[in-house]
Amino acid sequence: MGKLIKFDHVNTHGDFEKLLSHYGIDYTKRGNQLRALCPLHEDTNPSLSIALEADSDTKPNTFHCFGCNQSGSIIDFAAHLDGGTVREGAEIVAELSGCGLAPAKTKSDKKPKGAKRPAKAREVIKGANPRPVAGKAHTGGSEASGDVSDGDPGNKPLKFALKLDHDHPYVVERINRWARSQFGIGVCDADSRSMMAGRCCVPIHNASGELVAYAGRFLGDDPEAEKWKFPPGFKKMQELYNLHRVAGADLVVLVEGFFDAVRLAELGIAAVACMGTAVSEAQVALLQGIGVRRIVVAFDGDDEGQAAVPAALSLLTRSFFTRHGALPVGEDPGSADEMALRRLIG
């Protein structure tokens, strides 16, 4: 059974401005009305109107496009953009808005301490069988959604692309001109309304080469800031970064981070990143799907990276000829010298 969703609650408390910013849609605001180019059709003159509050003819948090004649609630709008169901639209709106899927329970709503769970619910939990995952799902210390379950539809292709500065000093210092062109990495304008504003953004594609997400790297020095940001609902462990570019390779180097994979690509070495130290069965299946036979695991040379190597090797050796490509202590594929990296592949 899925999570309980009170659609009226989400529609009422959803934040349309945050939703538009999340999808990189620029808008203007006048009073309680928003206007924007409609992303649901080829729009050259802002024809999308959004009502934030009710009036005599309009419900709050609703949209109408005078070009394509689409209309509905904030949940409907999110479902249109994401290409998903109304339920999935509600989950996106609730997460972006921070309003929850249903009103918070009061004390009187809670079950008394010691109340037993219904027998049927106990049976469902007892029969749950999540797929095994090796290591901890993280990227640069930042948590991201990593659940993998049977029947999950996976990440849907995006219907927009962020405008990025590919020649920003942060990017130029880290990757060469060829890689900037090949991988599309760039910095999102700090004045953008996108949730990735001011961050170095890495486009993430699925196995078919479709853009499914952006990961955003914080550029400042604030130790409290979220180092890597992923979109709400993104299922990281159902993707492998750079997979679509290495299809047909016999040997692939598996690394942790985006820039590790890019550095190896600059040297002509096929590499994919699991975006952390966790390896899932879904990712194994992706590697099998492109015909890989040999895997070299080259996680970072820090304690966390090396601690995750045995679990990754255990999972991968069931399907591939696998070995550990050890790096000097404290180094990673993005910083190691070229000779050390070439020794990884023998």
Image (cartoon, rainbow, N blue to C red):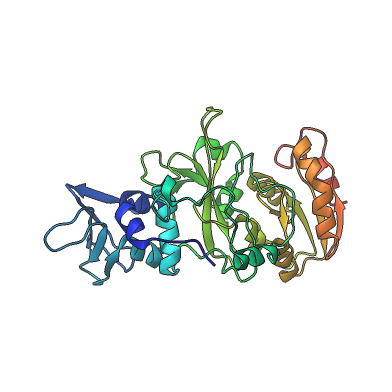
Q: Position of residue 329 (x, y in %)?
A: 81, 33
Nearest the eye: 344 or 219: 219
x and y percentages locating residue 287 in the rendered image: 73, 64
Total labels drawn: 0
> Quick check: 292 left or right of 166?
right
Query: Looking at the rendering, which quadrant does residue 67 occupy?
Result: bottom left
Q: Is residue 40 left or right of 212 when viewed as pictured?
A: left
Q: Locate residue 157, reporting x and y percent.
A: 50, 65
Q: Nearer the viewer, residue 199 or 313?
A: 313
Determine the residue positioned at 43% across, 66% down. 87
Between 183 and 327, the one nearer to me in the picture: 327
Q: Residue at x 59, y 59 (%)?
A: 117
Give the residue at x 40% y 66%: 79
Q: Is residue 251 left or right of residue 25?
A: right
Residue 161 place in picture, x, y as percent: 44, 57
* Residue 76 visible within the image: yes
Q: Which quadrant would the N terminus be assigned to in this image?
A: bottom right
- In this rendering, does residue 82 appear at all? no
- Answer with left or right where residue 286 lies relative to residue 6: right
The residue sitting at the left extreme is 56
